[in-house]
Amino acid sequence: MKIRLLSFLATWYLRFVGMTSRIIRVNPLVRQRMEAGGKGFIYAFWHGRQVFLVYLHQGDSLRPLISHSQDGDLIAKVCRSFQLNPVRGSTSRGGAEAVLEMCRIVEQGGRISITPDGPRGPLRQVQPGVLYIAQKTGASIVPVAYGARKAWVFKGWDEFLIPKPFNRIAMVYGEPITVGPSDDLGQRARDLQIALTAVCAEADLSAGASGHE
């Protein structure tokens, strides 16, 4: 009952933010090109920048990876409210099964989304799961981020950012990153970390963010 109530309120709030805000999309041709290519691919974004993506990608055939936790249960229910069907799993529970499922989705031409620093951190440090999937399937990783002129930032480990209503919000798509069969995953992790940092900075700049509460 608590999860249902919270998910209802969260869904209503995100829709209200979206309806009352100006949304700017930066480099949308990246998304269009990837979707038109007919191949599966992976969206990657920091854990603290995930909540408003469900509104920005509502109704997409995107399959987000959501952990098996109470917070994950809430996020999964909110995802379903926006017609997004999550894959459940994490490094601590159901990880192997989730990786196999995500590989299958991508190999069949679908798209998935992963928070490389989730579900427990460290903050903005890329963990190997997303790179392993990209290397195994040959799928590209598209780094993405949203920024908001006005937002609350919660002081947990992930600096979770929630946009406020009546806002200016920017959605940024970075250039795809590929992971070859012989690539060093440590180096590719550094490349992805740099790319994610860059799209976050561009999203904040495009949104006109000047510091959050």
Image: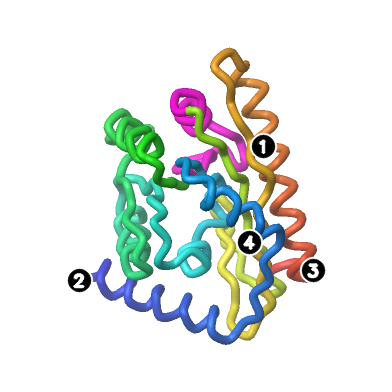
Q: Residues within 10 Å of mark 3 (few under 14, many from 20)?
A: few
Q: How is the image coloured?
A: rainbow
Q: Which residues are magenta?
A: 114-137
Residue 193: mark in rendering: 1
Q: Badge 1, how many Cα within 10 Å: few under 14, some, many 20+? A: many
Kindly report the distance in space between the C-alpha atoms of the residues bearing marks 3 and 4: 14 Å
Determine which quarter of the picture holds residue 40. Answer: top left
**Residue 195 visible here:** yes
Image coordinates of residue 153 in percent, x first then y, are: 61, 64
| First of labels 4, 1 by sequence position | 4
Q: Which mark is residue 210?
A: 3
Foreground pick, 182 / 144: 182
Cα–Cα gap, marks 2 and 3: 38 Å
Residue picked out by circle 4: 146
Q: Secondary structure at mark 1?
A: helix
Residue 134 location in percent, x, y?
Answer: 50, 30
